[in-house]
Amino acid sequence: MTARCIMVLGTTSGAGKSWLTTALCRYYQRQGFKVAPFKAQNMSNNARVVASPNGLGEVGSAQYFQALAARAEPDVRMNPLLLKPERDTHSQVVLLGQVSEELANMPWRGRSNHVWPVIAQALDDLRAENEVVVIEGAGSPAEINLSSSDIVNMRVALHVQAACLLVTDIDRGGAFAHLYGTWALLPENERALLKGFVLNKFRGDASLLAPGPQMLQDLTGVPTVATLPMWWQHGLPEEDGVFDDRSVARGAVKQTVAVIAYPRISNLDEFQPLKNIPGLRLQWVRSPSELAGLQPSDWIILPGSKNTSGDLAWLRAQGLDAAIAAHAGQGGAVLGVCGGLQMLGEALIDPHGVDGNAPGLGLLPLVTVFEVDKTVRRTKTRFTSAMQGPSQPWAALAGVEVSGYEIHHGQTQPHAAMMAAGNVAVPVLPDGLAWQNPAGNVLGLYLHGLFEDPAALQALFASHLNKSPVPTLDTVFDGLADFIETHFEPGVLQSLLR
């Protein structure tokens, strides 16, 4: 096989590249093609554990979901370069699934010559194994300050002579200027690869767009091939590092789950299933006032973090530490996931300069030590049959088998002196994966993906779900494919393969 390549470019970040790529993966798979996704470089702290030449490695979550949409086994070649921001001026660099300190220490522009051969080989290998490869760009292809070191947009498109779609977010305003300006800044050989413009997130009467699309085609020679209506709740996790700030619920609100949205939040996509629970409001929180109305039956979640000590300092600066402690003190449910688990303990100890030293929140008698080597693995395990606090929500997980994944530098153990004094963290998963406080209302675990596990969801939200099952990912992917099939001009999706 030598796959035909279709590439989704955007006029800006957040234009809709990721979800449109996902939709195209499922659309072409349903046409009977063997399909794989690809994104040369992704900058995101949302990552998944997938197959790699060295066993297991990391890729951006967007490419993980795109692979599932294509009904393909996710592997690191689908996102050969992953940048995980740790600070405003520094990112951890992951090449073919493995952390590379050497690349992280290189200048940005100097890095491209080292990684391009790996990126090109990964793409060529996927082309050899598939009939269609759907490629996602990054940011804008017209970032002229970066064009000389480009490894993710038009260099990729030219390498495989991809049929390119350029998508813009019309809800932001200036869509026609964004499309024309992007086209105008591209050299002629790159313009020739643009096969269609896509207007995304349109609200209103589509007839009011005229004569804009025709005028744009007269100027550029590129037709507008789709106007996609605004679709708030398509069911796919938010693309890359962007999440939906709106607090929403299906039906009357019975319970609130408040997720602390610190600056280096990671793996936030794992909370997407909570948006689909009837009567549950998922709320992203940045200030104590947003926690003021919580009831003990409501939850606070401390999610993963790419800079645990930095996000813990931010949390304290906002006064959220006191608000979280007050909720826990009233018997309210608190959950820490990975970095959130580390924050719930007594201390962060960093002998190797991986993350940083810091005192913890003191809600679990645990200590975390950061190691140089990163734990990256898939995990299938079972909660103990004697979870603490029978009146607490976490007791519903007793005996439940769950699957998920781990990505962490920290290794966490009970605080020896506190344990000797009788203040004991109760292990509820084997191998140091999870602990509770004796009261049972505070739970910390290293396992990502708890809310993506059907058994765990059913156990935790049985009263919400009743006979209203949560939509499966397969249903979501089919819905995306149906959506683009309805709103693209007839014959366009087929013509991109020719």
Image: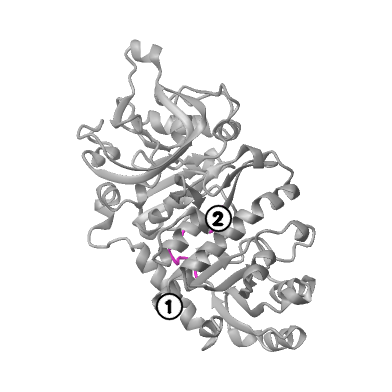
Q: Residue at x 75, y 88 (%)?
A: 218
Residue 331 makes an appearance in the image: no
Q: Secondary structure at mark 1?
A: helix
Residue 232 falls within the magenta-colored stretch: yes
Q: Residues within 10 Å of mark 1 (few under 14, many from 20)?
A: some
Q: Position of residue 440 (x, y in %)?
A: 30, 31
Residue 105 image-quadrant placement: top right
Q: Which mark is residue 240?
A: 2
Task: Name the quarter where the C terminus is drawn.
Answer: bottom right
Viewed as shown, does residue 54 lie left or right of 136?
A: left
Q: Which residue is mark 1?
A: 482
Give 386 or 352, whichever is nearer the viewer.
352
Q: Residue at x 58, y 83 (%)?
A: 205
Instruction: Compute the Cα span from label 2 to label 1.
Output: 23 Å
Residue 444 image-quadrant placement: top left
Q: Is residue 327 above or below residue 201?
A: above
Residue 307 falls within the magenta-colored stretch: no
Q: Position of residue 401 (x, y in %)?
A: 25, 44
Q: Position of residue 173 (x, y in %)?
A: 69, 71
Contact, mark 2 vs mark 1 (Cβ under 8 Å): no
Q: Is residue 64 above or below residue 329?
A: below
Viewed as shown, does residue 39 lie left or right of 35?
A: right
Viewed as shown, does residue 400 lie left or right of 50?
A: left
Which region shows up in magenta?
Answer: 231-244
